[in-house]
Image (cartoon, rainbow, N blue to C red):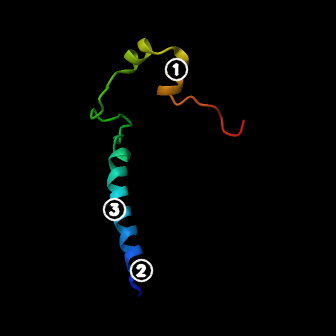
Amino acid sequence: MKKRYLLQLGAATVGTVLLSRYLSPLSQAQTASGEFDSNFEIVKTDAEWRRILTSEQFYVLRQHGTESPYQ
């Protein structure tokens, strides 16, 4: 194995480890019950969000109401 390939493999391995450590907290933010952890800066109930946002904003931001794809 040439030195260049060994260095490339090492760099790819280190990059993968660092990236997985960065992404794993993002994927673990939602618990099994579907509720989010309270590790976020802003934690509000749906009623509080409804009071702050318009009905359209609430639908898009909290209920994932986006356009259908390819329209």
Amino acid type, callout 1: Gln
Identified at 42% across, 11% down, the residue is: 51
Is 27 placed left or right of 65 in the picture? left
**x and y, in percent, of residue 45 in the image:** 35, 21
Q: CA distance from mark 1 to mark 3?
A: 37 Å
Residue assigned mark 1: 57
Q: Bin the neighbour count of mark 2 within 10 Å (Cα to Cα): few under 14, some 14-19, many 20 and up.
A: few
Q: Quadrant of the N terminus?
A: bottom left
Chain-order first, disc 1 or disc 3: 3
Residues marked 1 and 2 touching at CB (< 8 Å): no
* Viewer-nearest of discs 1 and 2: 2
Amino acid type, callout 2: Arg
> Which quadrant of the view contains residue 7?
bottom left
Residue assigned mark 2: 4
Residue assigned mark 3: 17
Identified at 56% across, 28% down, the residue is: 65
Where disc 2 sits, the SS reads helix
Q: Is residue 47 above or below residue 38?
A: above
Q: Bin the neighbour count of mark 3 within 10 Å (Cα to Cα): few under 14, some 14-19, many 20 and up.
A: few
Amino acid type, callout 3: Val
Q: Bin the neighbour count of mark 1 within 10 Å (Cα to Cα): few under 14, some 14-19, many 20 and up.
A: some
